[in-house]
């Protein structure tokens, strides 16, 4: 009969249901852990990374100066009045005087999708008795929405066609100021310039820092509040492949002699934490695989000891060593597949349970919204690979021992 080894393997599985359940259970527990833990953590990491990248340019061009570079003309003055203040003011300015020339220089660089000049700095926003420090950003809305996903994050109102007295703020800041679209606020720039604005839009990125402390105004308004004249102090850039941002930033720096920082450089800590997490998960997976392999091997050793006579009879009837090995290896693989399927079901159940547990939470440490937790496909496939490899390797030694049994000795025991 063709494939008789497969039918014998099924017979052994059905006649030793407890041992089969032990093997499948060990595999399913391992699979559940391998899939569940990375799915939770990577959902949080990826959500944080996506929100961070989507709410900021992939690359930011700024004009860097040596902060405390000596100004000889100031130091040679006989009067020392306001020396420190004047020296710092002259050397800390980071303005780009002609951003259109910069855009012309970077135009030939491949991979750039969109650019948006901006004027940014610290400011104070006031509504009645409430006063908050914020990060002010003056933008050209039509350019900015091509670089940063502000439009997608809008909860109320608009960000397009910002007038000279229009402002867009985050929802957390709106709650703290107790304001809504149509209300008026006062904004004071770092040099004391004050101006009244009307709230025309409220956004929510899901990042606490952005939603509590970021506001957008028209570029001209930003230049006025920051006293920049017609200058800007940054240009945001979006690229086709965000993981090529570091390389493109280097090309921009060479072409313009300006500082170009990629999102990867600004979010180095998140990326490093992600790398460390993958290393830890890899070590945990090794321990899980080792435990599962040990249980499979020990169960098969006991199974072979109990089936010595049957093995001896099969060999006396002409079964070859490879056939005997295939009986036990195929049994391990079948149980491994069953364990994998039950493990996926278990992992999905744990994800649903954990998601329901988090549903009552108001937010995370860095975010104002809870990310959607989904099963990580890469780790699900990795678990399948580990399952097949573990089942195969764990059953080879016991199967080889069974194939080497002397049929006469096995029958006469």
Image: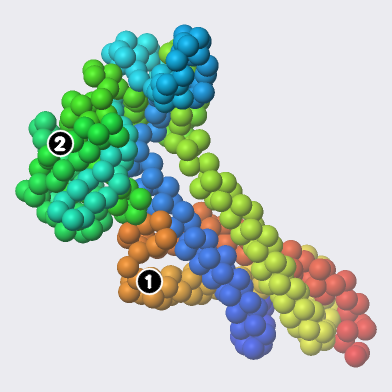
| Applied colour scheme | rainbow
Q: Is residue 179 visible?
A: yes
Say above or below: 9 vs 390: below
Q: Considering only vertical position in the picture, is 344 above or below 303?
A: above
Residue 205 in sight from this viewpoint: no
Quadrant location of the C terminus in the rendered image: bottom right
Residue 225 position in % (x across, y down): 22, 31
The x and y percentages for residue 228 are 27, 22
- Mark 2 burial class by Cα count in 10 Å: few <14, some 14-19, many 20+: some
| N-terminal-most mark, 1 or 2 | 2
The kind of secondary structure element at disc 2 is strand
| Quadrant of res 263 | top left
Q: Pick the quarter of the image with the N terminus.
A: bottom right
Residue projecting furthest to the bottom: 413
Q: Which mark is on residue 83?
A: none
Q: Quadrant of residue 59?
A: top left
Front residue of 231 and 265? 231
| Left or right of residue 329, residue 212 in this image | left
Residue for point 28% across, 19% down: 231
Q: Position of residue 356 (x, y in %)?
A: 36, 74
Q: Is residue 411 above or below residue 108?
A: below
Query: Label 1's element?
Result: helix
Residue receiving disc 2: 195
Mark 1 or mark 2: which is in front?
2
- Label 1 Cα neighbours within 10 Å, binned few <14 / some 14-19 / many ≥20: some
Residue extending farthest left: 182
Residue 179 coordinates in the image, percent (x, y): 14, 55
The image quarter in which residue 219 lies: top left
Residue visible at 49% across and 24% down? 67
Pointer 1 residue: 358
Which residue is at 10% across, 46% downward?
A: 184
- In percent of the image, x 75 and y 73: which residue is there? 294
């Amino acid at each position: 009969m063709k494939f008789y080894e497969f039918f014998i393997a099924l017979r052994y599985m059905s006649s030793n249901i407890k041992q089969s359940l032990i093997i499948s259970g060990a595999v399913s527990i391992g699979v559940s852990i391998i899939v569940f833990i990375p799915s939770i953590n990577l959902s949080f990491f990826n959500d944080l990374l996506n929100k961070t990248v989507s709410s900021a340019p992939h690359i930011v061009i700024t004009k860097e100066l040596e902060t405390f570079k000596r100004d000889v003309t100031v130091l040679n003055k006989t009067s020392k009045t306001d020396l420190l203040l004047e020296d710092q003011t002259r050397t800390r300015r980071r303005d780009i005087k002609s951003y259109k020339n910069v855009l012309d220089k970077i135009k030939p660089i491949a991979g750039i999708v969109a650019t948006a000049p901006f004027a940014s700095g610290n400011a104070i926003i006031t509504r009645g008795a409430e006063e908050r420090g914020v990060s002010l950003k003056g933008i050209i809305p039509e350019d900015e929405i091509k670089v940063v996903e502000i439009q997608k994050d809008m909860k109320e109102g608009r960000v397009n066609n910002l007038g000279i007295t229009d402002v867009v703020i985050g929802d957390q800041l709106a709650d703290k100021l107790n304001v809504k679209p149509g209300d008026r606020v006062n904004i004071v720039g770092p040099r004391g310039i004050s101006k009244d604005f009307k709230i025309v839009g409220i956004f929510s990125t899901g990042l606490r820092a952005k939603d509590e402390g970021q506001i957008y105004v028209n570029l001209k308004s930003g230049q006025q509040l920051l006293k920049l004249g017609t200058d800007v102090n940054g240009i945001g850039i979006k690229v086709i492949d965000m993981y090529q941002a570091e390389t493109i930033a280097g090309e921009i720096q060479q072409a313009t002699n300006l500082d170009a920082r990629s999102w990867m450089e600004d979010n180095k800590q998140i990326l490093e934490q992600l790398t460390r997490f993958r290393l830890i998960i890899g070590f945990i997976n090794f321990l899980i695989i080792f435990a599962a392999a040990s249980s499979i091997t020990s169960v098969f050793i006991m199974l072979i000891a109990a089936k010595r006579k049957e093995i001896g009879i099969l060999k006396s009837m002409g079964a070859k060593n490879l056939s005997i090995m295939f009986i036990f290896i195929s049994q391990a693989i079948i149980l491994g597949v069953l364990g994998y399927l039950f493990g996926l079901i278990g992992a999905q159940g744990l994800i649903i349970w954990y998601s329901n547990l988090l549903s009552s939470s108001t937010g995370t440490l860095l975010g104002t919204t809870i990310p959607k937790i989904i099963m990580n496909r890469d780790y699900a496939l990795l678990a399948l690979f580990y399952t097949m490899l573990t089942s195969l390797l764990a059953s080879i030694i016991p199967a080889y021992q069974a194939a080497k049994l002397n049929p006469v000795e096995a029958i006469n025991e």
